[in-house]
């Protein structure tokens, strides 16, 4: 057998540089895009009325996240409800939890006031869009009213 010349192997630096360039070009590596479980690129507001179930499930002085419907509802006082999109205004991830009256985005840790939709902590800079909400037959109905 004849001896083959040794092939140089890629250095760690070359591999890392290539990965960084691929990421910068949007090839193969994504930080936020395509995170299906997080709801990236989810619609920010409902296009039809959405029945969220019993209004009593939202505690007075608190809030509830309706993640499947991408909605956040707070109840500042008895008989008063406010609804907002639960889609973060930074990278459009769906909010994942409520702590007191603060809503959290899992992607970059933006935090929002669940009673006003205002940004409490960035990187998001825009408030959550308000959504019309009413109580009908004891159930919360969010979105465009018919």
Image: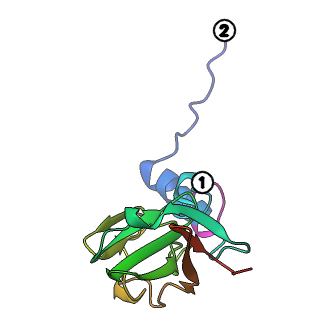
> Which residue is at a point 55% across and 63% down the rendered structure image?
52
Above or below, 38 against 72 in this view is above
Is 94 on the left or on the right of 104, as rendered? Answer: right
Looking at the rendered structure, the secondary structure element under dot 2 is: loop
Numbered range of the magenta stretch:
24-29
> Which residue is at a point 41% across and 69% down the rendered structure image?
105
- Quadrant of residue 19 in the image? bottom right
Looking at this view, is 53 or 107 the one in front?
53
Q: Position of residue 18 (x, y in %)?
A: 56, 57
Q: CA distance from mark 2 to mark 1?
A: 53 Å
Crowding around mark 1 (Cα neighbors within 10 Å: few <14, some 14 to 19, many 20+) is few
Looking at this view, is 8 or 142 the one in front?
142
Q: Earlier in the sequence, mark 2 or mark 1?
A: 2
- Quadrant of residue 81 in the image? bottom left
Is 121 on the left or on the right of 4, as rendered? Answer: left
> Which residue is at a point 64% across and 77% down the rendered structure image?
143
Is residue 111 something that shows in the picture?
Answer: no
Q: Residue furthest top?
A: 1
> Which residue is at a point 52% across and 39% down the rendered structure image?
9
- Quadrant of residue 23 in the image? bottom right
Is residue 53 something that shows in the picture?
Answer: yes
Looking at the rendered structure, the secondary structure element under dot 1 is: helix
Looking at this view, is 37 or 55 the one in front?
55
Looking at this view, is 86 or 75 the one in front?
75
> Disc 2 designates what residue?
1
Is 136 on the left or on the right of 16, as rendered? Answer: right
**Mark 1 and mark 2 in contact (Cβ < 8 Å)?**
no
Q: Which mark is residue 36?
A: 1
Q: Position of residue 93 (x, y in %)?
A: 52, 67
Q: Is residue 126 magenta?
A: no
Type of secondary structure dominating the magenta stretch: loop
């Amino acid at each position: 057998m004849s001896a083959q010349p040794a092939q140089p192997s890629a250095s760690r630096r070359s591999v890392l540089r290539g990965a960084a360039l691929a990421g910068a070009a949007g090839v193969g590596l994504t930080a936020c895009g395509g995170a299906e479980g997080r709801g990236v690129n989810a619609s920010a507001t409902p296009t039809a009325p959405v029945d969220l179930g019993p209004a009593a499930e939202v505690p007075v002085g608190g809030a509830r996240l309706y993640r499947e419907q991408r909605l956040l509802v707070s109840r500042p006082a008895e008989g008063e409800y406010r609804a907002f999109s639960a889609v973060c205004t930074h990278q459009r991830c769906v909010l994942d939890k409520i702590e007191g009256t603060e809503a959290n985005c899992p992607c970059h840790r933006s935090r929002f006031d669940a009673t006003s939709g205002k940004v409490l902590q960035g990187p998001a800079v825009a408030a959550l869009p308000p959504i019309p909400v009413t109580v009908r037959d004891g159930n919360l109905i969010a979105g465009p009213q018919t």
